[in-house]
Amino acid sequence: MPDVEVAAADAFPPGSSKIVRQGSLFVGVYNCGGELYAIEDRCSHDDGPLCEGDWDEDRCCVVCPRHGSMFELSSGRPISLPATEPVETFPVRVDGGTIVVELP
């Protein structure tokens, strides 16, 4: 998997989020309480953009802007309807002071 640079680690504090792209794949990257997560920017309910909506830092979940389904950032598992299927998540790490996400 290629590494895609997200941001300098010191410029991406808790509460930060950013959408990155690798080819036709869009991924939301989040710093939730100091933990880094990456989740596919596609709601499993209707294939709409997931990461363009709000996210809840207290619960570490993203909220689909179309129908309100919530997904855990750590697992991609839906935690509210109407979505019932998980979305893909990706490894994120800090490498030499830069946040990178491993994408296919």
Image (cartoon, rainbow, N blue to C red):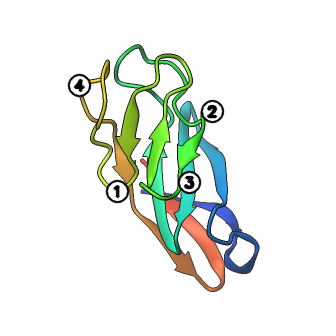
| Residue that badge 2 annotates | 52
What type is the residue that disc 4 sits on?
Thr
Labels 1 and 3 touching (C-beta < 8 A): no
The residues bearing labels 3 and 4 have C-alpha atoms spaced at a distance of: 22 Å
Marks 3/2 in contact by CB < 8 Å: the verdict is no
Residue 18 spot, x, y in % from top left: 66, 51
Considering only order in the chain, which callout, 1 or 2, is on the residue closer to the N terminus? 2
Q: Residue visible at 29% across and 37% down?
A: 79
Mark 3 or 2 closer to N-term?
3
In the orientation shown, which residue stands out farthest toward the bottom? 96
Q: What's the amino acid at mark 2?
A: Glu
Residue at label 4? 84
Name the spot of residue 57 as percent of width and height, x first.
Answer: 53, 57
State whether residue 90 is above or below residue 40. Answer: below
| Mark 3 residue type | Val
Q: Identify residue type, mark 1.
A: Ser
Earlier residue among tags 1 and 4: 1
**Helix or strand or loop: what does disc 1 sit on?**
loop
Residue occupied by mark 1? 74
Residue at 53% x, 75% y is: 34
